[in-house]
Amino acid sequence: MAERRRRPTAADQYRRAWAAGPPPDLAQFLDSVPTLLPDDLLDVIEIDRAERWRRGERVTAERYLKMFPAMRNDAESALVVIYGEFYLRKELGEVPSLLEYSTRFPQHARRLRDQVMWHEAIELGPPAAGPPEIPGLVVGDLLGRGGMCSVFRAVDAESGDTVAVKVLDHDHRQHPLRAARFAREISSLLRLSHPHIVRAIRTGEAGGLPFLVMEFCAGGTLAARLAGRPPAATVAIDIILALAQAVEFAHGMGVIHRDLKPSNILLADRSTSAWQAAQPRVADFGLAKVAAEIGGSLTATREALGTPCYMAPELATGARDADARTDVYGLGAILYELLTGRPPFIGTAPLEVVRMVREEAPMSPSVINADVPPGLEAICLKCLEKEPDDRYQSAATMAAAIELLTPTRPLQPSHAHPSAGSRDPRSDK
């Protein structure tokens, strides 16, 4: 039943157009879907190219990149288009030359080489059962598995430190878009050095699969620690201020997270009672948007961008609209759960939750938890405004508003870089 109710994607529609009659015109089709998301555009291009090549019309990667200049100027998206042609030729029984592609696309030569090497390693066969073998690490038990990656506990053989290692799952490594998303997460984390962002230690490739070694957070996720039981308001303030600092720092480095939620917040301290020592860390930048991207490229294809009950309203209509205020909404959603023990919206089906996110106001936190301070409730609800212009315009101004509620508390040193959206909190609506 769920599959029957799923709305056809642009890729579904374009695939049907090819099956229904003569070759459709790509430009005319795209004119009929003006709100197409960048990742869906990549899917449509892949279908168009595959169908035309199988009919003898060898449309080149250069032609697609010329048609879509924004995609040409985005390194990750361009790589997907270029390597898609290389991989299609292999599927058609040809033997494309890496030298040819390096000559045609010199600015992408190194990444193309890495991509080809990874695929060649994969084609040698699947990895052995059990944890992956990674040089310099003793890989242990599985900590968790997401949509396309697995995270293992490991011990650094040289230092003896416990670390976490994130590995792209074998099945997803053959999907250029997902591989590019994982590469982007690695790139984002390596750039972001902040005490409240999970620390990236090193990256590499083993057995044809890319991996990222990160600090190990023994306390698990904020979602698991909460488990429906909100801590005291003072604890909520400490945690959200730390996260706001980390988010503002990321924004200053040109990175928008876009998927802030309690399950993407890790706790460095394993104590289940000493909330004051939780030491939160922002993690999972798999859906992050970086400054060089076209608006929102490389987001999850045919999947909601983010989890519906924490998703900012603008993400329900177009990921290209994401900016710093989208993460302010995410901080507000985390604060809401810290105050109430539940997300801002709860429904019986994802589509119902998306409708609520777009159309309904969240219940006031004090209705759920009478101990919520009025000032903190007002800040939380301002973060969750439907229109980005009605929210705090940066994580820094949100944090400043919270700090004004507690003038006697010593302010934490700010590690944030200035961002274009930062301004005096008194100038916010």
Image: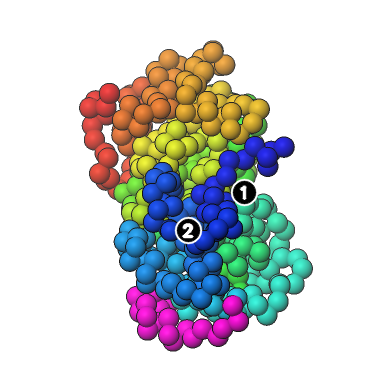
The image quadrant of residue 411 is top left
| Circle 1: element type | loop
Label placed on residue 218:
1
Residue 424 appears at what percent x and percent y?
23, 32
Between disc 1 and disc 2, the foreground one is 2
Per the rendered image, the range of residues in magenta is 92-110
**Marks 1 and 2, how far apart at CA:** 54 Å
Q: Residue furthest front?
A: 21
Q: Name the residue nearer the viewer: 232 or 123.
A: 123
Q: Main structural element of the magenta stretch: helix, strand or loop?
A: helix
Image coloring type: rainbow
Looking at the image, residue 208 lies above or below residue 286 = below
Looking at the image, residue 130 lies above or below residue 344 = below
Residue 96 lies in the magenta stretch: yes
Left or right: 94, with 62 as reference point: right
Q: Quadrant of the C terminus?
A: top left
Please name the amino acid that badge 1 sits on.
Answer: Ala
Looking at the image, residue 320 lies above or below residue 182 = above
Residue under label 2, please give it: 24
Looking at the image, residue 343 lies above or below residue 85 = above
The image quadrant of residue 205 is bottom right
Q: Quadrant of the N terminus?
A: top right
Residue 151 appears at what percent x and percent y?
63, 57
Residue positioned 33% across, 66% down in the render: 66
Residue positioned 54% across, 13% down in the render: 367
| Circle 2: element type | loop
